[in-house]
Image (cartoon, rainbow, N blue to C red):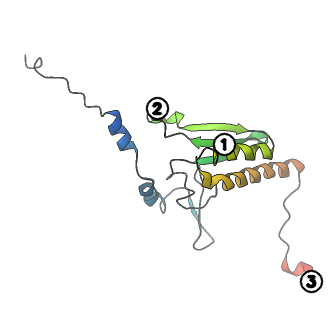
Amino acid sequence: FFLAKLKHVDRRPERSQLRAMANVSPDLIWGCVKNTSAFLRKGRFPGVSFSTEPGNLTNKASFKASGLANKKTIDIVQLEGGKLQLTTNVTDFEGTMRKPAHTKRTTVLSKNMTAVAKTLSAVTADTFYRADLKRAAIAKACALKMSVKRKASGSKAKPARKKWEWL
């Protein structure tokens, strides 16, 4: 009898409310993460701390390079066979809010270093994604490519020369 008079109330938040709840200031995230991250590596060098988080190209523990605090991140990972995998975030699109699997876009880079540098330049600076990370992305890709060449040739890195060898 009384149930017929009750109206159905939809308690789900609207899309605009979801978007407002999901967006947290990167400064706030960095304030929470900068000293307590599981990826933080403090070690032998006083005053310098490194980070191993995904999306951090320079491995420095700073707001600019942080892969956790920034919405737009770039990550380069080495795959088997000398190929590189470029991963970028696409969280600015509306459809990715409820689909976390679709928030990352990956590209396999298997060409020579010149083509890889052109691709990285096109992804970063040419599309206004993160122009400040262009040099760091190319440097990391170059280092990863050189490590593959060093492994393939069988040559090892030269050990540091001792002080008394030149005397």
Q: Nearer the viewer, residue 107 or 134?
A: 134
Distance of mark 3 from mark 1, alpha carbons? 47 Å
Residue found 84% across the figure and 49% down from its top = 149
Distance of mark 1 from mark 2, alpha carbons? 22 Å
Instruction: Name the amino acid, label 3.
Output: Leu
Q: Which mark is residue 167?
A: 3
Q: Nearer the viewer, mark 3 or mark 1?
A: 1
Q: Nearer the viewer, mark 3 or mark 2?
A: 2
Q: Is residue 82 above or below residue 12?
A: below
The answer to whether marks 1 and 2 mark residues whose Cβ atoms lie closer than 8 Å is: no
Q: Of the residues under marks 3 and 2, which one precedes in the sequence?
A: 2
Picture coordinates of residue 95, whole percent (x, y): 46, 32
Pointer 1 residue: 86
**Which residue is most to the left?**
1
The answer to whether one can see residue 93 in this image is: yes
Quadrant of the frame with the N terminus: top left
Q: Of the residues under marks 1 and 2, which one precedes in the sequence?
A: 1
Pointer 2 residue: 95
Residue found 63% across the figure and 37% down from its top = 106
